[in-house]
Image (cartoon, grey):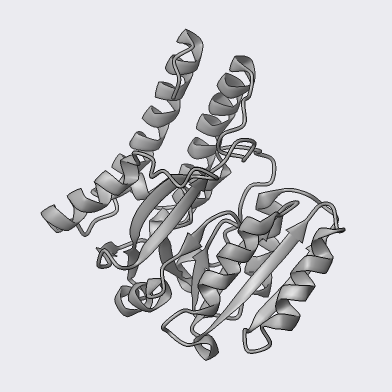
Amino acid sequence: MQISVIIPTYKPQSYLIDCLNSLAIQSIGVENFEIVLVLNGCKEPYDSFIKDWIKDNPTININYIQTDKPGVSNARNIALDEARGEFICFIDDDDYVSKTYLQELHDQASIACISLCHPSAFWHGGGIKDEYRIEKEYYRGKRLNINTLLGAKKFFAGPCMKLLHRDIIGDKRFNTAFKTGEDSLFMFSISDKINKVSFTSENAIYYRRYREGSATTSNRSRREKILNSLRAIREYILINRKGNYPFVFFITRLLAEVKCIFMDTLGIKR
């Protein structure tokens, strides 16, 4: 198996079908990848409509798992333990990808190189493309021919929009003690194995859907945000002590959390 596509989902709606349908038509061919779909938390009525999709798409290699324990980090960790692919691809359940997404990422990825895609974003329901900072970073990376972790550091705030060799991840897992910020912590924890990056063409697109009530748009109290950033700083330091991590990248992660604390203290929207 070449690629394991990991999708955690919680109380999914029709957007999950959009995500799965985009994978069903991948140009790489269904025999070359599997989907590891983990439904976490409430089982019904979500379990039934997921099984209906699986029944309607018998050619897709899908490992469907249901766990009563909620949490995106827990779901991703379960999927990582189950994944059979040489490469790992993370996709959020409310996003979807272009037809050549997996093929182009796979063409450029290796045990020594992480391939990065063309990111795009839109608002759920309106279909209006949102101004997306990471998309600007993509074009900057292509224009300047960036191939280093530090040069593409803004792509490493989370696990999506890239293809990772399973040896880069190893036995590292998401920290389930964090409700937010766990993505960045995970990416930093595997940064000691990242040697270089490569960008796909503009045709390999990850479409990020923004919707009210999603984990990335939910409101949290100012105090909660500040405490979470302080805990994250402590965790970065603990991780850094355990291995040979890129020092400059480590400093950028700390500075990012300090910036969040400053903005949250002043009530400035991030």
- Mark count: 0
| Front one among 91 and 264 | 91
* Rendered residue at 66%/83% (across/down): 57
* Rendered residue at 46%/43% (across/down): 240
* Rendered residue at 58%/23% (across/down): 225
Q: Is 234 located above or below residue 123 in the figure?
A: above
Residue 1 visible in image: no
- Would you say 171 lies left or right of 165 here? right
Q: Quadrant of the C terminus?
A: top left
- Would you say 138 lies left or right of 23 here? left
- Would you say 57 lies left or right of 238 here? right
Q: Is 162 located above or below residue 132 in the figure?
A: below
Percent of width and height locating residue 216? 56, 38
Residue 69 visible in image: yes
Percent of width and height locating residue 51? 78, 73
* Rendered residue at 36%/61% (across/down): 194
Percent of width and height locating residue 14? 66, 58
| Front one among 189 and 105 | 105
Q: Quadrant of the N terminus?
A: bottom right
Can you name the residue that lies furthest to the front here? 126
Percent of width and height locating residue 195? 30, 63
